Every structure is written in C-alpha cells, then in structure tokens.
Amino acid sequence: MVIVEAETREDILRLVGHISPQAREFVSEAFREQAVSVFHYSRTEEVHGVFCAAENDDCTIAYVSFLKMSMNELTFILGLIAETIRTFLEEGDGKELCFNVYGENEEVIAFIRSIGFQSDMEGYHLIYTKTEVPDVPPSQMIGSYLIHNNSIQDLVVNPDYQNCGYGSVILSHCVAHMRANKGIDNVCLRVAKSNWRAKRFYERNHFEELASFAEHTYIPG
C-alpha cells in the first residue's frame, strides 16, 4: 500500500471524480476517516492514474481511473488488481466488495469482469452547462420529473404528449425549478451507456459529460 502524501490527495480525488461525483465524495469521506488504501498512483508524461480502495462499515469499493496509461502500465495494473482482489477475498471480512472503473479504461473493465465482478451499471454523469435559467411555458401537465439533491433521477412524458418535443419542455421546467427554487447551480444526472438516445437528448439540451463510470459488485462463483 502506498502512503498518501497530503498534496497528492486532491489529484487522486480529481481522478476518482472522472468516475462519478459520488465516487469522489465517498473517497473524500474515507480519506477523512483514514479508510483509503492507495495501491498505485502515478503522474508522469506517459501515465496518470490511480488504483485505490475506500471503505466504510458496510462495503469496500475499489477504484481505477487512468487518464493516460502505457501498455506496460496496463499489464502492471491488471496484475496488481488480481493480487489485491485475491487478498481481499482471502481476508473475507464479510463486507460487500465493489469495483468502480473510469468508463474509458475498457481493458480494466473487461479484466475485472473476468475475475468475478458483475456489472451493475455502465454510463455517464452529465452536468447542465447553460448559465441562464431556461424559459418555460405556462403550467400544463405534460409529464413529471424526480429530483434528489442536485441530481435529476427520472423524467417522464405523458403518453399523450410523447414524440412532440415536450421532453425538452419538462427538462427546462426541472432545471428552472432546481435553480430558481432550490438554489442549485450544478444540476446533474446519470444516463446508461446503452441509452445513447437519452444521452444525445440531454446533450442537445445543454448537458455535457462530466464523468464516465462502470460499476461492479463481486459475485462469488
């Protein structure tokens, strides 16, 4: 395990943030509780990334996020992952074991699935980037939305109004409500990688990709 110097923590959190804002928050809290193990961290011209694990009372979550990685580094990381996970399983503390990977690290994703991790969800975190509060038409029940904190969790269009462009209207209502009434500036949402139509819809409506994730849980064979 690598001893983490204070000045490297913020960069590690930035790297984990490329997986998801929630991942960054979880690791940040674990740092405060001295519950983070950094197995490998590198920042050079050829390599920039981290392999670490954070835990609480209920689970241990491993994270891999590399923005740059050479083939030699990839070979090393895959071997280190195999060795580290084997140690976790041998210790068997009864906690749920999860593994979240930056969505662009496809070789790592394929490898952890080959050693017993089952995919929970793969997708993107998007953030609303338009600075102005969107204009919305007069109130009319054409759909609904569900929000939690700064995240849009669901968006539904009344079947009578589907395929008429009202999805953008509902989304505008939602963002305007969150900004004007909730005081939320960084409006975010998650979308599955397989749901490319939804991702394109949100991108047309001023959302941009913030992070890319592949979440997994270990399932004993």
Image (cartoon, rainbow, N blue to C red):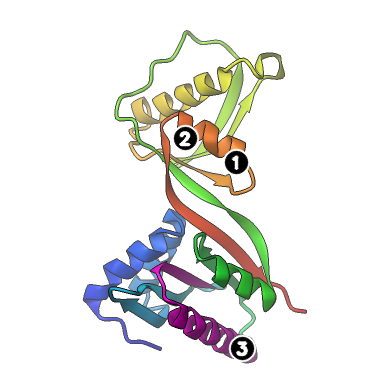
Between tags 1 and 3, which lies in front? Answer: 1
Compared with residue 199, is residue 109 higher up or lower down, i.e. above or below? below
Farthest top residue in view: 138
Q: Quadrant of residue 18?
A: bottom left
Marks 2 and 1: CB-CB under 8 Å? no
Q: Secondary structure at mark 2?
A: helix
First in sequence: mark 1 vs mark 3: 3
Dividing the picture into quarters, in which one does residue 107 lie?
bottom right
The residue that mark 1 highlights is 196
Residue 116 or 55: which is nearer the viewer? 116
Residue 93 x %, y %: 61, 85
The answer to whether 130 appears left or right of 74 in the picture is: left
At a point 51% along the width and 19% down the height, the residue shown is 169
Q: How far apart in space, not on screen, are marks 2 and 1 (Cα)?
A: 10 Å
- The residue carrying mark 3 is 86
Q: Tell me, yes or no, whether the highlighted magenta stretch contains residue 78.
A: yes
Residue lying farthest right? 221
The amino acid marked with disc number 2 is Glu
How many residues crowd around disc 1 within 10 Å: few (fewer than 14), some, or many (20 or more)? few
Q: Residue furthest front?
A: 71
Q: Which residues are magenta?
A: 61-90
Q: Tag on residue 107?
A: none
Image location (x, y in percent) of residue 142: 61, 16
Q: Identify the amino acid type marked 3.
A: Arg
Q: Which residue in the protein does label 2 denote?
A: 203
Pointers 2 and 3 in contact (C-beta within 8 Å): no
Which numbered disc flags the more N-terminal residue, 2 or 1?
1
Residue at position x 62%, y 70% in the image: 110
| Rendered-image quadrant of the C terminus | bottom right
Question: Split into 4 quadrants, where in the image is the N terminus?
Answer: bottom left
Q: Nearer the viewer, mark 2 or mark 3?
A: 2
Q: Is residue 208 above or below residue 20?
A: above
